[in-house]
């Protein structure tokens, strides 16, 4: 009897499991057939347990504002961030609801890690929020993103105040608008001006090279006993390693991954070696933190640069105003330097990127309404007076000017720096995406550097291994 | 009348048969298992033969590829060794410590409640960020431990910089949180009849003799329980490594559960993570089985296993 | 003789207290941290006395996120935890009784299944579990956070089984002669004698559930329904900033309920120790 029961159960669960999987396999790949995807998602929405309470509230609101055009719409929206971000975002949501009485926005917010765990469960159950926030890891979720193209064409999304360059940072290589960026960002090196002067090292210039960087780090270390350059965070792979490839040859000749994102963008693994060797040398000499010291950095706020134990550190520039203010309180001055180059007159390899963006989901029932909100969120000066660029430098010119006018010293430095990077020559076509699974390559790459420091492998071997790991992503 | 009584007694016989009683009492578990555990377990087994990843929605059957890949995956092999080392060191230490403290704190004294609370508090903070920060700072290059070491004229140690050493602070943290084992032991100690001790006292047994002859045998079912549970939980340990070292340096603290997390969530290889989990399920089952088999020789059971 | 005993007593207390202090130092540090500002916490100060006392961490923390305060989060946690803990005690003791005292067919099989449920990492069964709740339309509610606790928890079932093994079978036999059925043996004999195990279960399960973060994250989506464990985690945003002061302040408050539960129930583990012997 037992056995029979078990067999029945097994089959039953297999069937459930299978249909579950079959269902998932069937969902439309990306935005290839928007019409079909729409049908599917409305079915999905019907199947969803109806939030009665909201429906009631909606009708009330609709009654109250008879002048409002359109049917009542409930949008779900989510983001990650800090307490401040949650407070101000909800404030602008309420502002929007007041202006558009037929729209009700149900919001959820989390911290970064929780957000993505939650998102993954929603992807699995086809109920991703109508409006959701994504950062550099968005290629993983590309199947769930509904491109904004048609809304830009129809005028639902207003891009008149946004320059093409800033629209491009959230487009794929075919020109599809994946989302609208919440903020501009790029990498740089924050440094302590006085520590450079004390060690008698010339301050970084716009076109300084990796050799200058390594020299400076070593000299400062010898002179002050501090680290020349602080830890290399996980973003170093993009800011350093991958930039290092893009800096070789002519502008646009090399890149870490190719434009189509289906293979490598350079052929000789040894192009990486000098960079890895330099990293290992700095750590070996004590001019850069080893694995143990690096682990003591928990936040940008206790980075060795901020605690006064290092002269330089890598930053995503939107982090700069915070650490600038902390150091200013202690009478120290920080400044931003560009990412060093391979050759003085070679390509900079750096580009303006998007710190994060808002996207419309494939699962949304009201894609156009969602897109309208995003448009308002990026373009409304009134809205951004509340948001105050907390998510990054706004992409709308008018909004940016309004905020720039009241910028603090640290923020000014950041704005100037981003303008400077904007003037660098960039390839005609760039790929802002990175392949899914890149994290594994990055983690391994960081371990290889530690192995080079320990003398287990050579820098040449580390380059080969990193190249092989990256190549494996496309197999 | 007689018929009714017969019927009633047949019903009551049915209700009181071992089968019925067993399934009535076990019903909550069986219901829950079938509804909420069984399907996810089978699904994860199915995933282990696919290339399922959570972001994308497509899924291909890949046969035993994931399982074969395990044996050529350097990180997995390394994590397996580290996990076993972690289990072998942390479980006995934690249990010995928990038993010792539980035993010392059974004295009849008003202070015992307070003391026991003191020792239980660490288990109430789990893997919180505060604890992670303290632990990091204690073992930092210029942290308290190294200050003490250098004051004693010893060489300072770069705990989190050396992949051979980084596991020890984590083991210590696990042992530090021995509270739940301790109170289970305390409850077990309470169950030992005081007459046993009185008899031993009359026979003139020493403290150690009493402990070895009475306390340990009477407590052995609880020791077995704690051993099995702590072993399984140690294999599943995730938080310590996740909040403090994130598996580093150079994968020196890459515990198996953290590796599963990375594969499933960070690298998007859910299928592979499932294969890894099922492989480890077999490893754990074998170890648990061995513990159960040997327990026959050292567990003293009052109620008997019939 | 007398003084030697006193000395030994003093040594015992001093040792226990000193060691206890070392044990709870990190917790004290967290409490101290709830009065420090971010930079002091991050500068690696191991001191327990804040340079400047910053009580505003508590008000900043308490106000919560976007209008939902910690009063709400704590209330949510409390409801879920109490209901789930109650469920664990009831269901686990029932199931343990079946596994330990009733010789039914399939017992070993179900026991093995129970242990197996503990051996798969939650990371790999999380999504399939979520999909089940989603398909039956209960994903966005407290049900998935509570109902499974009424189906027995392996850790506690097994624990109660081991404690039941310590209850002499002769008691069951005697009760049967007195006319007790298997059902009344459970209520009249086993359950009362299982008290220490139940107390332990309450203490441990309460804390685990209180601290559970993954469950609420997956199954709750309205900020008003978040639990304290989930809300505390939100002070640390890996992508922007972490407000350590507020986080420590709320973590400190969050310790109070679990610690109180421990204090209340711990009494039963000490009170009259050694006198409740079963064979007495």
Image: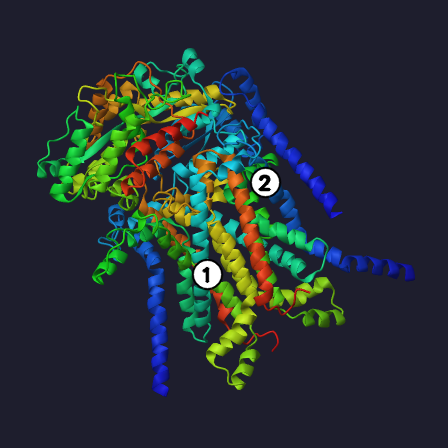
Q: Is residue A311 left or right of residue C67?
A: left
Q: Is residue A163 visible?
A: no
Q: Earlier in the sequence, mark 2 or mark 1?
A: 2
Residue A67 x, y percent position in the rendering: 46, 19
Quadrant the N terminus of chain B occupies: bottom right
Q: Is residue A263 left or right of residue C102?
A: left
Residue B119 x, y percent position in the rendering: 40, 64
Extreme residue in the top direction = A153
Q: CA distance from mark 2 to mark 1?
A: 32 Å
Residue pointed to by mark 1:
B92
Residue pointed to by mark 2:
B40
Residue B24 x, y percent position in the rendering: 71, 54
- Rendered position, A393 above or below A6: above
Q: Is residue A436 visible?
A: yes
Q: Which mark is residue A212?
A: none
Residue B127 x, y percent position in the rendering: 40, 50
Q: Which residue is found at the position 51% from the left and 16% from the top?
A: A34
Q: How many other residues sit within 10 Å of disc 2, few (<14), some (14-19) or many (≥20)?
A: many
Extreme residue in the right direction = B2
* Chain name for mark 2: B
Q: Secondary structure at mark 2?
A: helix
């Amino acid at each position: 009897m037992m056995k029979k029961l078990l067999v029945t159960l097994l089959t039953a669960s297999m069937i459930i499991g299978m249909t579950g999987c079959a269902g998932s396999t069937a969902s439309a790949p990306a935005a290839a057939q928007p019409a079909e995807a729409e049908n599917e998602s409305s079915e999905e929405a019907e199947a969803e347990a109806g939030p009665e309470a909201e429906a009631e509230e909606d009708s009330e609101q609709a009654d109250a504002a008879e002048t409002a055009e359109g049917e009542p719409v409930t949008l779900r929206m989510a983001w990650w961030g800090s307490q401040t971000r949650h407070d101000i975002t909800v404030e602008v949501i309420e502002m929007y609801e007041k202006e558009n009485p037929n729209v009700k926005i149900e919001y959820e917010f989390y911290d970064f890690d929780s957000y993505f765990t939650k998102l993954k469960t929603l992807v699995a159950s086809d109920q991703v929020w109508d409006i959701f926030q994504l950062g550099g890891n968005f290629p993983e979720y590309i199947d769930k993103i509904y491109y904004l193209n048609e809304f830009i064409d129809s005028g639902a999304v207003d891009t008149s105040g946004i320059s093409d360059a800033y629209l491009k940072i959230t487009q794929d290589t075919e020109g599809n608008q994946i989302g609208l960026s919440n903020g501009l960002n790029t990498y740089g090196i924050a440094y302590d001006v006085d520590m450079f002067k004390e060690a008698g090292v010339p301050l970084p210039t716009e076109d300084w090279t990796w050799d200058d960087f390594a020299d400076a780090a070593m000299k400062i270390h010898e002179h002050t006993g501090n680290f020349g350059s602080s830890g290399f965070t996980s973003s170093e792979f993009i800011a350093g390693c991958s930039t290092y490839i893009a800096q070789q040859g002519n502008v646009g000749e090399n890149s870490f991954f190719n434009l189509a994102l289906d293979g490598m963008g350079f052929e000789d693994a040894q192009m990486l070696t000098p960079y890895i060797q330099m990293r290992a040398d700095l750590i070996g000499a004590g001019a850069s933190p080893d694995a143990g010291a690096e682990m003591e950095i928990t936040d940008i706020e206790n980075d060795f640069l901020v605690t006064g134990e290092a002269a330089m550190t890598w930053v995503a520039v939107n982090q700069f105003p915070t650490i600038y203010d902390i150091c200013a309180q202690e009478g120290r001055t920080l400044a931003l330097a560009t990412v060093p180059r391979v050759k003085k007159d070679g390509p900079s390899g750096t580009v303006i990127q998007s710190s994060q963006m808002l996207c419309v989901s494939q699962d949304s029932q009201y894609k156009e309404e969602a897109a309208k909100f995003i448009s308002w969120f990026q373009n409304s000066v009134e809205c951004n007076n509340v948001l105050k660029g907390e998510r990054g430098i706004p992409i709308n010119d008018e909004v940016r000017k309004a905020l720039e006018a009241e910028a603090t010293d640290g923020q000014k430095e950041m704005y100037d720096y981003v303008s400077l990077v904007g003037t660098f020559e960039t390839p005609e076509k760039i790929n802002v995406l990175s392949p899914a699974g890149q994290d594994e390559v990055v983690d391994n790459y960081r371990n290889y550097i530690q192995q080079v420091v320990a003398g287990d492998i050579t820098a040449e071997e580390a380059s080969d291994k990193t190249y092989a790991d990256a190549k494996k992503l496309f197999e | 009348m007689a018929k009714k009584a017969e019927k009633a007694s047949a019903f009551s016989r049915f209700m009181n048969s071992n089968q019925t009683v067993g399934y009535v009492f076990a019903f909550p578990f069986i219901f829950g298992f079938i509804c909420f555990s069984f399907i996810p377990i089978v699904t994860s087994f199915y995933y282990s033969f696919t290339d399922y990843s959570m972001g994308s929605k497509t899924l291909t059957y890949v046969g035993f590829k994931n399982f074969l890949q395990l044996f050529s995956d350097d990180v997995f092999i390394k994590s397996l060794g580290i996990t076993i080392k972690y289990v072998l060191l942390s479980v006995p230490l934690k249990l010995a410590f928990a038993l010792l403290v539980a035993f010392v704190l059974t004295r009849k004294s008003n202070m015992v409640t307070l003391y026991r609370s003191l020792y239980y508090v660490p288990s109430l903070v789990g893997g919180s960020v505060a604890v992670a920060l303290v632990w990091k700072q204690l073992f930092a290059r210029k942290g308290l431990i190294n200050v003490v070491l250098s004051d004693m004229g010893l060489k300072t140690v770069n705990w989190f910089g050396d992949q051979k050493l980084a596991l020890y602070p984590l083991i210590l943290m696990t042992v530090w949180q021995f509270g739940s084992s301790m109170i289970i032991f305390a409850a077990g100690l309470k169950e030992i009849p005081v007459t046993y001790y009185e008899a031993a006292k009359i026979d003139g047994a020493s403290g150690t003799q009493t402990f070895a002859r009475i306390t340990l045998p009477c407590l052995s079912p609880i020791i077995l329980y704690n051993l099995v549970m702590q072993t399984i939980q140690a294999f599943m340990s995730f938080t310590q490594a996740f909040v403090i070292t994130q598996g580093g340096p150079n994968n020196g603290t890459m515990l198996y559960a953290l590796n599963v997390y990375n594969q499933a969530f960070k690298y998007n290889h859910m299928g592979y993570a499932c294969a890894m989990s099922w492989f480890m399920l077999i490893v754990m089952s074998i170890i648990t089985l061995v513990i159960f088999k040997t327990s026959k020789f050292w567990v003293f059971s009052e109620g008997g296993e019939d | 003789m007398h003084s030697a005993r006193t000395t030994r007593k003093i040594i015992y207390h001093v040792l226990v207290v000193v060691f206890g202090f070392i044990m709870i130092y990190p917790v004290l540090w967290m409490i101290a941290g709830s009065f420090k500002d971010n930079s002091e916490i991050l500068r690696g100060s191991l001191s327990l006395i804040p340079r400047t006392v910053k009580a505003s961490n508590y008000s900043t923390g308490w106000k919560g996120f976007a209008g939902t305060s910690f009063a709400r989060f704590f209330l949510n946690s409390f409801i879920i935890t109490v209901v789930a803990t109650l469920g664990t005690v009831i269901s686990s003791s029932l199931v343990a009784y079946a596994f330990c005292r009733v010789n039914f067919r399939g017992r070993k099989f179900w026991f093995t299944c129970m242990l197996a449920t503990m051996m798969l990492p939650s990371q790999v069964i999380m999504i399939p579990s979520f999909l089940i709740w989603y398909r039956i339309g209960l994903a966005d509610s407290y049900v998935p956070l509570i109902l499974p606790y009424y189906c027995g928890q392996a850790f506690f079932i097994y624990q109660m089984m081991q404690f039941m093994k310590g209850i002499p079978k002769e008691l069951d036999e005697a009760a049967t002669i007195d006319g007790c059925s298997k059902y009344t043996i459970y209520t009249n004999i086993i359950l009362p004698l299982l008290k220490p195990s139940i107390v332990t279960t309450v203490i441990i399960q309460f804390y685990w559930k209180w601290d559970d973060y993954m469950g609420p994250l997956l199954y709750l989506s309205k900020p008003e329904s978040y639990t304290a464990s989930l809300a505390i985690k939100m002070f640390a945003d890996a992508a922007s900033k972490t407000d350590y002061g507020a986080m420590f302040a709320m973590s400190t408050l969050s310790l109070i309920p679990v610690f109180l539960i421990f204090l209340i129930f711990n009494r039963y583990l000490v009170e009259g120790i050694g006198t409740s012997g079963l064979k007495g």
